[in-house]
Image (cartoon, rainbow, N blue to C red):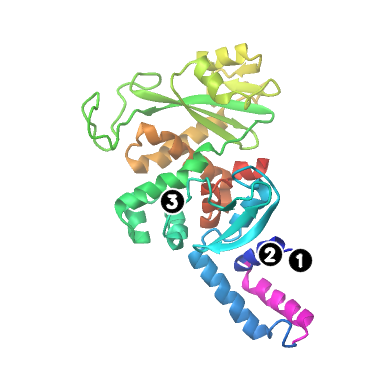
Amino acid sequence: MESHEFQLWLSGIGNLSAEQRTQALAFLSERGGGDEDGWRGGEAFGESVASSARGRDRLDALGGVGHLKVGGQGCPHCAGRNVVSWGRSHTLARYRCKDCRRTFNALTKTPMARLRKKDQWLVYAMAMLEGASVSKAAQACKVHYTTAFRWRHRFLSAPATDKPKRFTGLVEADETFILESFKGRRSDIPRLPRKRGGKARHPGSFFENIAVLVARDRHGATFDAVLPQPDAASIKAAVAGVITQANRLVCDGGLPLRAFARRANIRCHVVPAPGKPLPEAPHFHINNVNAYHGRLKEWMRRFHGVATKNLANYLGWRRAMEAWGPQANPENWISSAIGMGPYQQLTR
């Protein structure tokens, strides 16, 4: 077995269940023959594996994800695939590209590069999955409040860009509006401050509201974008190549979406009222995207207002949680943070 193949196999040991580990030990014990130059006895080998797995889980939060990322995406410097293992440094496996002759690890050129306290990443990932506040996450990880805040947005930088590259079949799309917020800003606020998020004076398109476009196909793939203006040009810039002529767009008749579909030659079906499809066309509705709007806003309520400059990160947070579904766990959350999110894994 090649060295890099062995490292990839070894990285999966920490993910084995107790029963799987017992079966693996029995198999290796039979094949090893029990001699001094072969595998060690089952009990001693098991203790070594368990100790190694515990140490790796504690020190290297990436586990086998790093090997999968390098195997799937290659060298971060030149995208070459001729990569070999190159030892370890600071608890992370390193690799060397034979094409550009540069070394790297799984975090190189990712938002998580050079982030310290890796032994607390899994704890912090669990806090994010639970939607914990920054102060509670800081307390759980025994780090300062400002460190926990910086970690939040380092963890969210990659999920914010992890979106489906193309939709299939019928696509529902609709805008929702979130109140503009200058949360965290200390000066040059163009209005009086609001407390705990505040409430918009007028719903819908209004100068205080930020337009967020959400599109979903019937397979559950979700795309969202913060629009600089609620118009057809902004929608075209956001969804170019994602919604194509191969799709059929369903919307509630808003002028920007209809104008976008007309200019892009995309078939568009306008529902007479949200949640009330016509009896002769029951599959034309926007119930899925409207339900997503409701879940998004209910989830965001716990933050008592999200700074508009960080809104894209929070949209990515919610989108990644929905995409992972039952598989949303700390390991997969760290996988998203290093650029191996659910959509990136499906399209690589």
State the CA–CA distance, disc 2 to disc 3: 29 Å
Secondary structure at numbered mark 1: loop
For residue 133, say whether it is visible. no
For residue 195, say whether it is visible. yes
Which residue corresponds to the image point at 51% horizontal and 48% vertical from the top-left? 337
Describe residue 218's horizontal placement relative to residue 141 as left or right. right
Q: Are marks 1 and 3 in contact (CB under 8 Å)?
A: no
Within the image, what quadrant is residue 171 found in? Answer: top right
Which residue corresponds to the image point at 45% horizontal and 34% vertical from the top-left? 312
Q: Are marks 2 and 1 in contact (CB under 8 Å)?
A: yes
Query: Dot 1: within a 10 Å radius of its alpha carbon, few (fewer than 14), some, or many (20 or more) residues?
Result: few
- Mark 1 or mark 3: whose residue is earlier in sequence: 1
Q: Which residue is mark 3?
A: 128
Q: Which residue is mark 1?
A: 1
Task: Residue 262 in the image: state x and y as whole percent.
Answer: 61, 12
The kind of residue tagged 2 is Trp
Secondary structure at numbered mark 2: helix
Quarter containing the N terminus: bottom right
Where is 332 relative to 183, above or below?
below
Quarter containing the C terminus: top right
Span shown in magenta? 16-34
Secondary structure at numbered mark 3: helix
Task: Residue 316 in the image: state x and y as whole percent.
Answer: 49, 39
Where is 219 relative to 260, above or below?
below
Task: Residue 117 in the image: state x and y as whole percent.
Answer: 42, 60
